[in-house]
Image (cartoon, grey):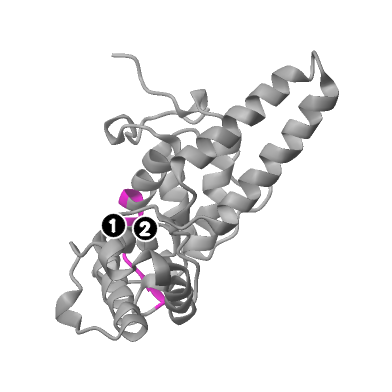
């Protein structure tokens, strides 16, 4: 079977993930620091070695859930028994109070959740307008430029004002917190669990690059 190669993925997409990795694990890559890295396993090992914190054998997702539950209780004034990993975010955060309550929760947690998005039909229309305008540059450039401005401005505005939940359950949000805000999601931000890092990175690459996890072996090549 042909070995799966991440090098077939847009390098900019991988770079975007690495920027997020820096924020999540509170690390910083120097220029060309990863030039020697050739496989997914090597990049996982390199990132683990950069995290200069004490190792503790505990579950970050569980700790993220407890932090999230505490923030939800404070924001929504509900009993903790009503908030489980399977609780639906749409039930806890009705549309009319969604934005204000998420902002309150984010302030309590100390980081953004990036939980809201525009409706799919809105982004779909604006992306179609953008593509049509790009093609139109070769024909009627004046109208095409107007379309480009409208679509780009519309996408920006839709992203700012979107009120659709990007996840379904509290448990899914806790996993997102673990991935995107690993250190801040832990009970003690001066510790980490070495055994979790590769799994978190696998989830991240799989989610952002739309890659089947089974293909993200340690031997999957980046170069």
Residue pointed to by mark 2 = 176
Residue farthest to the right, as pictured: 142
Judged left or right of residue 73, residue 190 is right
Q: Residues within 10 Å of mark 1 (few under 14, many from 20)?
A: some
Whether residue 194 can be seen here: no
Q: Residue at x 58, y 42 (%)?
A: 15
**Figure check: 161 above or below 69:** above
**Figure check: 216 above or below 57:** above
| Residue 83, position as x, y percentages in the image | 20, 73
| Residue 121, position as x, y percentages in the image | 47, 38
Q: Quadrant of residue 186?
A: bottom left
Given residues 68 and 20, the one toward you in this image is 68
Residue pointed to by mark 1 = 172
**Figure check: 94 above or below 141:** below
Judged left or right of residue 22, residue 41 is left
Give the alpha-carbon distance from disc 2 to disc 1, as whole Å. 6 Å
Q: Secondary structure at mark 1?
A: helix
Q: Residue at x 29, y 82 (%)?
A: 73
Quadrant where the N terminus is found in the figure: top left
| Residue segment shown in magenta | 189-199
Q: Is residue 4 magenta?
A: no
Q: Secondary structure at mark 2?
A: helix
**Figure check: 168 above or below 72:** above
Q: Residue at x 40, y 47 (%)?
A: 204
Q: Are marks 2 and 1 in contact (CB under 8 Å)?
A: yes
| Residue 26, position as x, y percentages in the image | 52, 66
Q: Residues within 10 Å of mark 2 (few under 14, many from 20)?
A: many
């Amino acid at each position: 079977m042909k070995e799966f190669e991440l090098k077939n993925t847009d390098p900019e997409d991988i770079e975007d993930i690495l920027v997020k990795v820096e924020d999540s694990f509170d690390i910083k890559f120097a220029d060309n620091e990863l030039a020697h890295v050739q496989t997914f396993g090597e990049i996982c090992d390199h990132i683990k070695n950069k995290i200069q914190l004490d190792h503790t054998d505990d579950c970050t997702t569980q700790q993220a859930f407890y932090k999230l539950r505490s923030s939800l209780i404070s924001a929504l004034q509900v009993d903790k028994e009503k908030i489980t990993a399977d609780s639906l975010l749409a039930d806890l955060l009705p549309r009319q109070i969604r934005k204000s309550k998420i902002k309150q929760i984010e302030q309590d947690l100390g980081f953004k959740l990036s939980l809201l998005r525009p409706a799919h039909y809105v982004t779909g229309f604006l992306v179609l307008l953008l593509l049509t305008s790009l093609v139109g540059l070769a024909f009627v450039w004046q109208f095409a430029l107007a379309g480009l401005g409208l679509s780009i401005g519309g996408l920006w505005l839709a992203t700012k004002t979107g009120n659709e939940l990007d996840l379904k359950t509290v448990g899914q949000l806790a996993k997102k917190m673990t991935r995107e805000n690993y250190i801040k999601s832990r009970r003690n931000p001066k510790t980490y669990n070495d055994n979790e890092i590769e799994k978190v990175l696998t989830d991240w690459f799989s989610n952002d690059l739309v890659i089947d996890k089974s293909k993200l072996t340690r031997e999957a090549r980046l170069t």
